[in-house]
Image: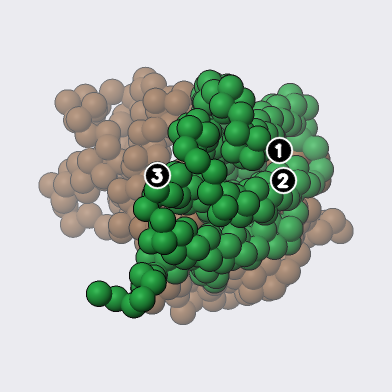
Chain colours: A green, B brown
């Protein structure tokens, strides 16, 4: 797109997107560190993540204040209006991602006090998928790439599938060995948090689609999370 | 973000008041406007926007043949007001301008009393049966223009003694007094402060229940606030026309986008 006649307007839009990317990068590394704390059973790293969330919250306030100021001062139209409104919404999506990463870290602390259970291995795999979603979403954001955003949007189904299979695995584990209920419950919530992060990444992808093309994606997103209907029978069949 | 709002005109209810087809305007050899096709919906505000010299005011003045008053100006194409061919040689231009009234950029009340400013039109068109009726027309016109409360008790004072915003509303009352069907407004607020502008915009909102309004404005925010349809002109052509909501959130043409966002085109 050509530049604004008022150069400062372009500078402000640039600053806004820089803040969003900074926020997204922070959220991405918070998730990575939280998962690392699980894998390495490192509770002090987990604590760092818990405390680190305030940085994301602070950035969110900064984005919102700045976007509102731009709305008041510039009275943006068309593509500019969409960019600024989307920034307001993206910042709250990222803020939620940060909250989920923080919750994963909190549960890592609890998990580290319980005996190791085998399904832990699925967590980093799932987290890697979600981190890639966040990263690609941010790339799509910087480059105004609606096609890339749409691809992220479709890919979230893989995360849902992984979550569903982990859900079943964890239920089976808990039935087999009641001593694993505490760590498995934490793992279940951790997996759910990561799955939710994926959902927020797809929300951001939708907003990028809207910013670039002027309308929200038309079809419903394919969803693979059917754990709401899952029933796992205990060994030996239902009693 | 994708559905219409209550500000959009409902497709099924749109009645077209004026139709322009292949309209072009020449000033001498120079073509100022080319190939404009535009439908003006009834009882709605249509905003014409675009950079200076884009032809929007020229187009506005075609709608009631104000361009006839400019020497060397030639209009081609068709303009219809309901079933009337506006440029038919048999059309009485004075009658036409009673049906399609106009309000200008600078308030231009006659140097006469407030009463006379409004009474003048109905009188020359023979719309009033007697003096009482004329008083009634003056009063309702001033009320419709939102001016009655401010001037009702001093109708004999000069129209030029009013503030700028009041003068502009007086001009609107004057236009309304001859019961027009369409009101053309050529940058009606560009000489007014924000409060006076708000009064005019509020007035337009009320008037559009009864009249068809076409406004030329340089203020995009104003077009966005007051109109239901927006037409963007550039270099003598109509580039894009759509619901105002669409023009200001998701215009299709890059030139429209460039203009309304303040970018180099």
Chain of the residue under label 1: B
Same chain check for tags 3 and 2: yes
- Judged by depth in the image, the label closer to the viewer, 2 or 1, is 2
Q: Earlier in the sequence, mark 3 or mark 2?
A: 2
Q: How dense is the environment of label 1, judged by Cα within 10 Å: few (below 14), some, or many (20 and up)?
A: some
As drawn, the residue found furthest toward the left would be B132
Q: Which residue sits at x=69%, y=73%? A: B22
Would you say B136 lies left or right of B261 here?
Answer: left
Of all chains, the one bearing label 3 is: A
Left or right of A103 in this view: B169? left
User: Disc 3 and disc 2: Cα gap in Å?
Assistant: 32 Å
Mark 1, residue position: B262
Q: Residues within 10 Å of mark 3 (few under 14, many from 20)?
A: some
Task: Please name which of the two marks, 3 or 2, marks the residue nearer to the observer.
Answer: 3
Residue at 72% of width from left, 45% of height from top?
A: A135
Q: Is residue A26 visible?
A: yes
Labels 1, 3: one chain: no
Q: Where is residue A103? Give x, y as percent.
A: 47, 36
Q: Residue at x 31, y 37 (%)?
A: B116
Is residue A17 shown to the viewer in this render?
no
Residue situated in front as seen by the camera: A119 or B209: A119
Residue linked to disc 2: A135
Q: Which residue is mark 3?
A: A182
- Give the chain of mark 2: A
Q: Position of residue A12 (x, y in %)?
A: 69, 27
**Front position in the image: B48 or A88:** A88
């Amino acid at each position: 797109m050509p530049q604004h006649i008022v150069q400062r307007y372009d500078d402000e839009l640039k600053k806004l997107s820089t803040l969003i990317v900074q926020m997204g990068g922070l959220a991405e590394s918070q998730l990575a560190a939280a998962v690392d704390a699980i894998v390495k059973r490192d509770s002090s790293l987990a604590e760092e993540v818990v405390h680190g969330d305030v940085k994301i919250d602070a950035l969110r306030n900064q984005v919102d204040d700045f976007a509102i100021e731009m709305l008041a001062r510039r009275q943006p139209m068309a593509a500019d209006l969409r960019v600024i409104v989307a920034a307001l919404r993206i910042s709250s999506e990222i803020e939620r991602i940060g909250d989920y990463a923080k919750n994963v870290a909190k549960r890592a602390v609890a998990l580290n006090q319980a005996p190791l259970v085998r399904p832990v291995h699925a967590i980093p795999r799932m987290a890697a998928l979600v981190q890639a979603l966040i990263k690609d979403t941010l790339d799509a954001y910087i480059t105004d790439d609606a096609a890339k955003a749409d691809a992220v949007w479709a890919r979230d189904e893989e995360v849902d599938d992984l979550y569903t299979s982990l859900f079943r695995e964890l239920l089976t584990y808990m039935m087999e060995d009641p001593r694993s209920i505490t760590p498995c419950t934490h793992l279940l919530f951790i997996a759910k948090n990561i799955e939710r992060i994926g959902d927020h990444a797809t929300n951001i992808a939708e907003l990028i689609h809207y910013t670039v093309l002027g309308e929200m994606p038309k079809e419903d997103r394919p969803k693979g999370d059917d754990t709401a209907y899952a029933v796992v029978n205990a060994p030996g069949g239902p009693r | 973000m994708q559905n219409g709002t209550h500000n959009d005109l409902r497709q099924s209810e749109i009645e077209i008041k004026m139709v322009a087809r292949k309209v072009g305007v020449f000033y001498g050899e120079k073509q100022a406007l080319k190939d404009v096709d535009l439908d003006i919906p009834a009882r709605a505000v249509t905003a014409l926007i675009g950079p200076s010299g884009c032809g929007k005011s020229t187009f506005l003045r075609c709608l009631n043949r104000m361009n006839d008053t400019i020497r060397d100006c030639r209009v081609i194409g068709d303009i219809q007001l309901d079933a009337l061919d506006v440029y038919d040689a048999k059309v009485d231009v004075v009658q036409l301008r009673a049906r399609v009234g106009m309000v200008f950029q600078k308030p231009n009340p006659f140097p006469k009393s407030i009463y006379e400013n409004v009474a003048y039109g109905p009188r020359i068109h023979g719309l009033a049966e007697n003096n009482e009726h004329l008083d009634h027309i003056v009063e309702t016109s001033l009320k419709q223009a939102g001016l009655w409360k401010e001037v009702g008790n001093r109708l004999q004072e000069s129209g030029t003694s009013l503030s700028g915003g009041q003068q502009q509303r007086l001009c609107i009352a004057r236009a309304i007094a001859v019961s027009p069907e369409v009101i053309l407004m050529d940058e009606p607020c560009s000489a007014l402060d924000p409060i006076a502008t708000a009064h005019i915009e509020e007035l337009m909102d009320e008037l559009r229940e009864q009249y068809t309004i076409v406004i030329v404005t340089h203020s995009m925010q104003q077009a966005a606030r007051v109109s239901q349809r927006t037409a963007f002109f550039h270099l003598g052509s109509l580039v894009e026309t759509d619901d105002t909501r669409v023009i200001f959130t998701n215009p299709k043409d890059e030139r429209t986008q460039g203009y309304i966002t303040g970018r180099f085109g």
